[in-house]
Amino acid sequence: MKSVILLLSFTAFLGLSACSQNGYKTTESGLKYRYIRGEGKSANPQETDIVTVKMDYFINDSLLFSGQKLGKPMQFPLSPSSFKGDFFEGLKMMSVGDSASFLCPADSVFLRLFRVKHMPEFVKPGAIMRFEIALDNIEKQADYEAKKMAEAKALAEEGRMKLEKYIADKGINVSPLESGLYYIERQKGTGEQPKRGEKIKVHYRGTLLDGTQFDASYDRNQPFEFVLGMGQVIRGWDEGLAMMNVGGKATLLIPYQLGYGERGSGPIPPFSALVFEVELIEIIK
């Protein structure tokens, strides 16, 4: 209900012209502000605190960015002001549950906050940017980091247990390499074994442990080429393909540490073990 109320308040306010400064107050530094909800009367965030916000910003009533399109909360440490009267100053005036509108000179925002080298052509001299911000949460940096570490530890343990179950369910009886990679040979190649620094051509199919396919060169009928051992691919690939001979096929069971790690990538969630069916087609001389 709270988020619905905030959204309605934001929507109602968007009808005001970005150029209109009626109803705005001005701080000593020159920041123009207007509370939409609340008045910043309880605890305010301090520099280095982690703030969770909803944010949209506009120039001349044209929406440039909407945090709602990110699909996840916006969280960042509260930084020192980049210029007098920026929206970081405004955030320091807010309390959890507040929403407010801030007007800032567009040239200062782009050049000093966004740090662009040249002003975009669509930004006219004297243009004003309007930031609509709702403050949802404040956390001390130490508390935030401790929470994230605990979450990461829990996800890593969950990933480890899923990998162990997959190995048991599939009846995999090979031992992992020292790195944690499981190399399962399906067909022994009769050609050369590639060396670090050589360019190789590979066909592959990649899936999550539940069988969800996230990529496959076979589907495109286009083998993938990369230079072995140079960090152009995930570590599990560099290690696994180095063990093969041309013409060979293998399954690489790659723990998250040798894959896309704690962050994941695209359709691959964080802490995901990966299964790759790979075929070494050629060493490109």
Image (tube, rainbow, N blue to C red):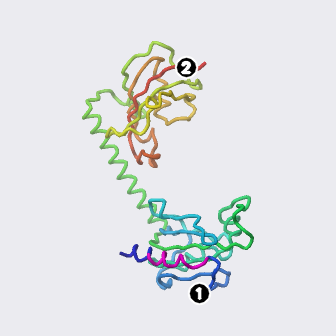
Neighbourhood count class around disc 2 (C-alpha, 10 Å): few under 14, some 14–19, many 20 upward = many
- The answer to whether the residues at label 1 and label 2 have Cβ atoms under 8 Å apart is no
Q: Residue at x 58, y 23 (%)?
A: 198
Above or below 28: residue 8: above
Compared with residue 184, is residue 136 higher up or lower down, i.e. above or below?
below
Q: Which residues are magenta?
A: 8-17
Three-letter amino acid code of the residue under disc 2: Ile
Specify the label residue 23 is tagged with. Answer: 1
Q: Where residue 68 sits in the image (x, y, percent)?
A: 47, 64
Residue 122 lies, with reference to residue 159, above or below; the image says below
Tell me if residue 174 is in the magenta stretch: no
Left or right: 27 as drawn, with respect to 43: right
Rendering quarter of residue 110:
bottom right
The answer to which image quadrant residue 72 occupies is bottom left
Q: Which comes before the other along the chain, label 1 or label 2?
A: 1
Main SS, magenta region, reads helix
- The residue positioned 44% from the left and 73% from the top of the image is 7
Left or right position of 122 against 150: right
Q: Secondary structure at mark 1?
A: loop
In the picture, the quarter occupied by the C terminus is: top right
Q: Position of residue 207 (x, y in %)?
A: 38, 37
Q: Which mark is residue 31?
A: none
Q: Nearer the viewer, residue 245 or 161?
A: 245
Query: Which residue is the site of mark 2?
Result: 283
For mark 2, give the secondary structure: strand
State the residue in front, 220 or 87.
220
Q: How far apart, in angstroms, are the residues tagged by discs 1 and 2? A: 70 Å
The N terminus appears in which quarter of the rendering? bottom left
| Residue at position x 59%, y 69% in the image | 58
Q: Residues within 10 Å of mark 1 (few under 14, many from 20)?
A: few
